[in-house]
């Protein structure tokens, strides 16, 4: 079972894998035609009522597979307003092929012809809410008909995820839906057929450009703040993480760091707000103030970059997580305390393969072996109760129930610091998206940023180079 939003992501991922939407539309249309043939014998009169999106495009294709049937196509709107290139191409093929087609400019003039089968191809799974004109009048005409109603993907007016309708909806006898069933279809009084249209399993398993749809479609959130608790022995890691958060959606990025290194971290970027505390490393005495600050401002915390592994620091990380109840990305030396801490916080953990083993996860000997252990990593995440992004040549992202793999990246990303940019990118996205989704997007975007730079940098890539490429990978890449 798959939600409407996830189906749109999978479609886009399939295209990125080399299965174009035009090819999928051809398969979908063929499936619709098969359903019509199940509903009526050759010679039957079939009326297609089509919208201007890809749902209508599927039906345009179906008509070409219905030789021997008396077909008519009724497009709701002007042909120049058909929304996608592939739907326009299939409409044009019907016109040039001298099929019986018409455009309906005014819903008041629409009359459904006498027919044996009506194909409802007005609205697909991506459209929700009450029907408007001309679809509302067309739905009334369809429901008044005695014909068998075949709906494409979902009856128009029905929410594919809930099965509910906000007012009028098409009353379908049959539904042919694609790739996988939709949650709301179980509640319909209709025969539902799930058609395999050739989407590769990898389009669901592998993170791709389709997974970025939520952030690309939404407006940038306001007041999203990242709070990096890091630094001490190392200064570059917290600076990289904090800047990556800014590049992926955070409005402000703070770094809490020990007095001796705070000026160095500030010197890396004027965009950072560095707040110093006493001492040369994180210790339990600072925890209370850090928790208060993070919770007061509803910050997304990044805990770990550059902290070091002093006993006091590890204990401070433990106490912070025990007291904190917000969202946090846990990385580097702070990871080892996660399995033993009872916390109300929402965590995304980003271990490399050695840190994963140290946390109690599977031991993976080589960088290219992580993907083969994905099921074990998922079991570990389920026991842990948090999202895990296991970093290696291929990243494994799992919350214990859902597991994805990101293959994005280059050999040059083995350089130090790319894990810090991943942690920061995750925080930037976690402010406005749910944890698993944020982790998937961040893993892909971090790797994709490396790919965008590969032609110039090759194996000379620096982690700081990724900062400029992250926005292009997230918002400006042309894979969509």
Image (spheres, grey):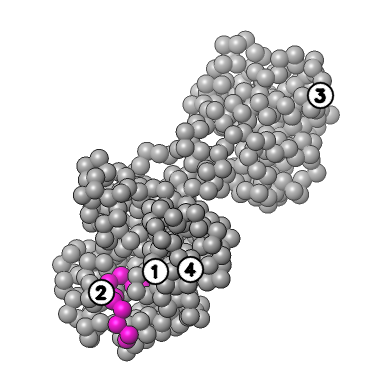
The image shows residue 380 at horizontal and vertical percentages of: 53, 67
Q: Are marks 1 and 2 in contact (CB under 8 Å)?
A: no
> Could you say which disc has been placed on residue 361 in the image?
4
Residue 54 at what x, y percent from top left?
57, 32
Disc 3 residue crowd, few under 14, some 14–19, many 20+, Cα 10 Å: some
Of discs 3 and 1, which sits in the foreground?
1
Residue at 74 percent across and 32 percent down: it is 150
Viewer-side label of 2, 4: 4
Horizontal side, residue 135 vs residue 409: left or right: right
- Please rate how many residues cluster around mark 2, counting C-alpha atoms within 10 Å: few if below 14, some from 14 to 19, many from 20: many
What's drawn in magenta, residue-wise? 297-312
- Cα separation, mark 2 vs mark 4, equals 26 Å
Residues marked 2 and 4 touching at CB (< 8 Å): no
Report, in whole angstroms, how far the alpha carbon at label 3 lies from the one at label 2: 71 Å
SS for tag 4? loop
Left-right relation of 114 to 151: right
- Which residue bears the numbered disc 3? 40
First of labels 4, 1 by sequence position? 1
Q: Is residue 300 magenta?
A: yes
Q: Are marks 3 and 4 in contact (CB under 8 Å)?
A: no
Q: Which residue is mark 1?
A: 355
Secondary structure, mark 2, is loop
Describe the element under mark 1 as helix, strand or loop. helix
> If you read the primary sequence from the N terminus, does the residue marked by circle 2 or circle 4 appear first?
2
- Give the CA separation, mark 4 to mark 1: 9 Å
Q: Residues within 10 Å of mark 4 (few under 14, many from 20)?
A: many
Q: Earlier in the sequence, mark 1 or mark 2?
A: 2
């Amino acid at each position: 079972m798959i939600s409407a939003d996830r189906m749109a992501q999978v479609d886009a991922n399939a295209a990125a894998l080399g299965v174009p939407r035009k090819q999928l539309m051809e398969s979908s249309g063929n499936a619709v035609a098969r359903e019509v043939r199940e509903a009526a014998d050759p010679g039957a009169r079939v009326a297609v009522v089509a919208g201007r999106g890809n749902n209508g495009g599927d039906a345009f294709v179906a008509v070409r597979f219905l030789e021997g049937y008396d077909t008519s196509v009724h497009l709701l709107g002007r042909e120049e307003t058909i929304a996608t290139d592939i739907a326009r191409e299939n409409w044009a093929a019907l016109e040039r092929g001298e099929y019986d087609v018409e455009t309906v400019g005014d819903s008041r003039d629409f009359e459904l012809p006498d027919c044996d089968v009506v194909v409802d191809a007005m609205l697909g799974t991506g459209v929700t809410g009450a029907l408007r004109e001309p679809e509302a009048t067309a739905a009334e005409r369809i429901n008044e008909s005695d014909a068998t109603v075949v709906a494409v993907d979902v009856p128009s007016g029905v929410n594919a995820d809930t099965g509910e309708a906000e007012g009028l909806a098409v009353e379908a006898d049959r539904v042919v839906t694609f790739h996988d069933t939709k949650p709301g279809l179980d509640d319909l009084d209709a025969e539902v057929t799930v058609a395999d249209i050739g989407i590769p399993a990898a389009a669901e398993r592998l993170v791709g450009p389709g997974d970025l749809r939520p952030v690309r479609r939404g407006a940038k959130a306001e007041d999203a703040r990242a709070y990096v608790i890091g630094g001490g022995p190392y200064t570059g890691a917290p600076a990289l993480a904090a800047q990556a958060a800014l590049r992926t959606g955070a409005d402000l990025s703070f770094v809490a760091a020990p007095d001796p290194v705070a000026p160095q971290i500030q010197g890396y970027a004027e965009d950072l707000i560095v707040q110093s505390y006493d001492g040369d490393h994180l210790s339990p005495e600072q925890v209370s103030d850090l928790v208060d600050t993070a919770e007061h401002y509803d910050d997304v915390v990044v805990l770990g970059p550059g902290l070091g592994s002093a006993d006091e620091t590890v204990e401070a990380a433990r106490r912070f997580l025990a007291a904190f109840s917000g969202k946090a990305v846990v990385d580097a030396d702070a990871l080892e305390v996660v399995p033993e801490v009872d916390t109300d916080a929402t965590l995304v953990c980003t271990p490399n393969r050695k840190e994963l083993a140290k946390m109690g996860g599977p031991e993976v000997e080589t960088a290219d072996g992580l993907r083969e252990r994905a099921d074990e990593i998922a079991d570990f995440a389920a026991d842990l109760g948090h999202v895990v992004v296991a970093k290696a040549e291929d990243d494994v992202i799992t919350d214990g129930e859902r597991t994805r793999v990101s293959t994005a990246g280059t050999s040059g990303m083995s350089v130090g610091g790319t894990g810090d940019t991943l942690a920061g990118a995750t925080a930037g996205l976690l402010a406005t998206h749910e944890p698993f989704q944020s982790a998937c997007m961040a893993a892909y975007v971090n790797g994709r940023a490396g790919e965008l730079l590969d032609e110039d940098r090759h194996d000379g890539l620096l982690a700081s180079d990724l900062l400029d490429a992250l926005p292009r990978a997230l918002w400006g890449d042309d894979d969509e």
